[in-house]
Amino acid sequence: MSTVAPTEPLDAALRATLGRLARVPQLLVAVDYDGTLAPIVDDPAAARPLPEAVTALRALAELPQTKVAVVSGRSLRDLAALSRLPSEIHLVGSHGSEFDVGFVQQLSAEARQLRTTLQQQVERIAAGQPGVRLEAKPASVAVHTRTAGDEVAAGVNAAVRSGPAMLPGVHVTEGKKVIELSVVHTDKGTALDTLRSRLGASAVLFVGDDVTDENGFARLRGPDVGVKVGFGDTRATHRVADPVEVAKLLALVLDIRRRWLYGERAVPIERHSMLAGGDNLALVTPDARITWLCHPRPDSAAIFADLLGGSPAGYFGVAPQRGGLPLGQKYLGGSMTVQTRWSGLTVTDWLDPTGPANRTTLVRQLTGTVTVRVQFAPRPEFGQVAVRLQPLGDGLVMLGSNEPAVLYSPGVDWDIVQEGEHDTAHALIDLRAAGGSAVLELRCGTDNLDPAPRPVEQRADEAATQWRGWLDGLRLPGVSTELVARSALTLRALTYRPTGAILAAGTCSLPEDLGGVRNWDYRYCWLRDAALAARALVDLGSVDEAEGLLAWTAGVIERTGGHPERLHPLYTVEGQTLGPEAVIDTLPGYAGSRPVRVGNAANKQLQLDVFGPIADLVDAVAQRRGAVSDFDREVLDAMVDAVARRWFEPDHGIWEQRQPPRHHVYSKVMCWQTVDRALNVVARHGLPERPDWVELRAAIAENVLEYGWNEQVGAYTTAYDGTDLDAASLWVGLSGLLADDDPRFLATVLAIEAELRSGPVVYRYRSDDGMPGTEGGFHVCTAWLIESYLRTGRRADAEELYGQFVACCGPTGLLPEQYDPLAERGLGNHPQAYSHLGLIRCALLLDSRR
Ligand SMILES: O=P(O)(O)OC[C@H]1O[C@H](O[C@H]2O[C@H](CO)[C@@H](O)[C@H](O)[C@H]2O)[C@H](O)[C@@H](O)[C@@H]1O
């Protein structure tokens, strides 16, 4: 039976404070014992903690990034015996002096002698005094008068105060019907400081009821929270009535922290749709909540990072006041505009592609007849700067960030609610009273709250028309026409138009292993991924992206100062070297997948495959144009130069494993492809012959074909030094190095199918990559196996796997990086260029080989 009686809920201010505290990266929950965990009773030996408090403490101690301590006036032995708390909970006895069982041995001989004297003197004082109890501790003795009459208590206390308490070296602590005489200085504040630094806490919750707990409250600072139990003066900023309320408080902290750590609302990754405006992007959930938006660039800090941190990390929600799930969500045909519908409400979202540079404009058009609840919680810099929202004119001004931002919202009455250091704006919009529509326009990069120059309907048309006009210029296959169109739009949307860079994906740190640590930042331009993405668009008839990317690539080549072999695998969208990889420990991660990383240490790796896709792209663009430009030739020369200088070295490979370099088969094949495509250009466009290139190509081919083959496995393996398999080795055939009917390619396809395919997915590899946890099947690897099936005459197998592959798309046609075939959900960053270019390549091949 519960001993916690149903009482009033904790007061709102305390709940709000605990809500913030429970979301710090490293939390220390420290509580006093008697009067806090255990109700005060007459007999000190009978003081037991409330079971609900114990349950909450134990559960808190099991959470990651959470430490629990009980800091008591009791001896450590007594505390352990009475509380029966498990070892995960740190126990500190003797008012903060006794951290471990050897404490008594650490006392000096004089201190031990003084302790004995004290014991003898208080025994004499207490002798024959009814109701007086003595409690012996390693460095002190406590004289309890709770069960003594008032007269007896007064006499005993006076005798103690004027007698042993006056001895030199004695420290006196008076508590609840107790005087304690100690031979060491005791201070719960010092104990808290020690725990804080030993356990690496970023904030402390300290709860206590007694006079000695005030030393603890006195040491709290910054985000720490102190809670006093019961009456009496205190330095604590909050108060609860009794241990029953303490148990409730602990349960509340547990609940909030658990939800924060494990993801408050982990919407399946593939169910997010992407908005894009040509120089930025955002993610919207199936219920029209904006959960991801960075500004000013897609690789900047987020304003809304709900995706990685739940509501406290920032979001922009719009939904009918009455609640309920939407009827559906879709892209408006051929555009990057997303429409979410409920009965009586349609929300149309887009990022304005017509604005000036460094401006992000998110337009949310609401139409219908119902009352709409709006919640606007911007949290710039991943929530690390305090935000104030100020109603002004036709909207709200966001204060606190060094980037100006406003929410233009004519006719909307905002209610600003302060949540700690941040404001959230709430509003109810009665659409019927507003004439059937309302507009919310988030303008980042400006403080202009003037009305937009053109009506919203016209702007909506303009935005959609830009994307549709581009899509109309493509030659789409008859296979999966709609999905290919969406994939093409996604690749175009991942293109950062100001520079021509193409992002590998729209997000950072979406997990490859739910709850795991494989969380990386993909908001950069990888030479390899970008070239493959641009190539897929060239195959669909659009060369603009390829030309933009090649111009961006020429920039990064130029900055190598004549050393293209020193190219990094990835750069920022501006073509600059990345800053250091970092962890944002204030974000708990998608579904609790921590750490949340920004930046990507892979940029320091050697990946010798990156030249191959670029050379292939130059070849494809030149072929499409029917001519090769001087500019293309320069890029091509640089790629071959890089290969000539380094192809024989071991490297980190396409999968960027944080392991020592190896001679990767895929990297060598891509080196071969670089020279092969360069020679294609030479031959096709009548350029001067390059016998040195012919020789180089032959040397690489001979090397990889001999050393990459593993007789024991009967296939091309990951690298020259092992028997492990890698789906990327399929490129020994996909690149054209081996003919489609070469038995070595056929054998490699069979080996990879057997070892790496699992139902609808193909894993990159199964070998140990040095990281904890596992990962899902990799969509682009699935696409490579489909291509391999087609090339090797297995059309039925290709069609079957292709059907399974496209079934992994989210409801609006988007794909993240990976798929977990057991949990049947997407994994990894989203949407991912690799996955969409893979889909396009497969659909084109299936179409052309009909
Ligand atoms: O720091 P704490 O964990 O709160 O310990 C303070 C003292 O608590 C105990 O005494 C008090 O609780 C007893 C049981 O409810 C009660 O009978 C007594 O009157 C209170 O003073 C404990 O016995 C002491 O050793 C602690 O110093």
Image: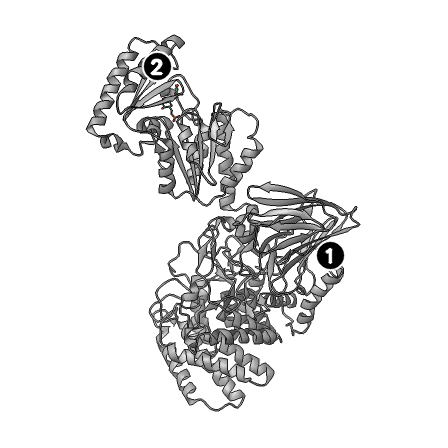
* Labels in figure, total: 2
* Residue 16: % across, % down: 55, 37
Q: Residue at x 54, y 76 (%)?
A: 551
The reply, left or right, for residue 167 in relation to residue 650 is left
Residue 802 horizontal side relative to residue 73, left or right: right
Q: Farthest left residue?
A: 109
Residue designated by label 1: 451
Under tag 1, what secondary structure? loop
Q: Position of residue 321 (x, y in %)?
A: 70, 43
Residue 389, x across and y down, in percent: 63, 47
Q: What's the coloring here?
A: one colour
Residue 680 against residue 829 in the figure, above or below: below
Q: Percent x, y for residue 431? A: 76, 47
Looking at the rendered structure, the secondary structure element under dot 2 is: helix
Residue 656: mark: none
210 lies above or below 263: above
Sequence-wise first label, 2 or 1:
2
Q: Are marks 2 and 1 in contact (CB under 8 Å)?
A: no
Q: Amino acid at mark 1?
A: Pro
User: Residue 650's quadrant in the figure?
Assistant: bottom left
Residue 89 higher or lower than 831, as above or below: above
Nearest to the observer: residue 78 or residue 448: 448
Tell me if mark 1 has few (under 14), some (14-19) or many (20+) residues whose alpha carbon lies within 10 angstroms of its own: few
Ligand 1 found in image quarter: top left
Report whether the residue tagged 2 is closer than 8 Å to ligand 1: no
Asked if the beta carbon under badge 1 is closer than 8 A to the nearest atom of ligand 1, the reply is no
Q: CA distance from mark 2 to mark 1?
A: 77 Å
Task: Say which amino acid is labelled 2.
Answer: Asn
Q: Is residue 792 visible?
A: no
The residue singled out by tag 2 in the image is 157
Q: Which residue is nearer to you in this view: 496 or 453?
A: 453
Q: Nearer the viewer, residue 722 or 414?
A: 414
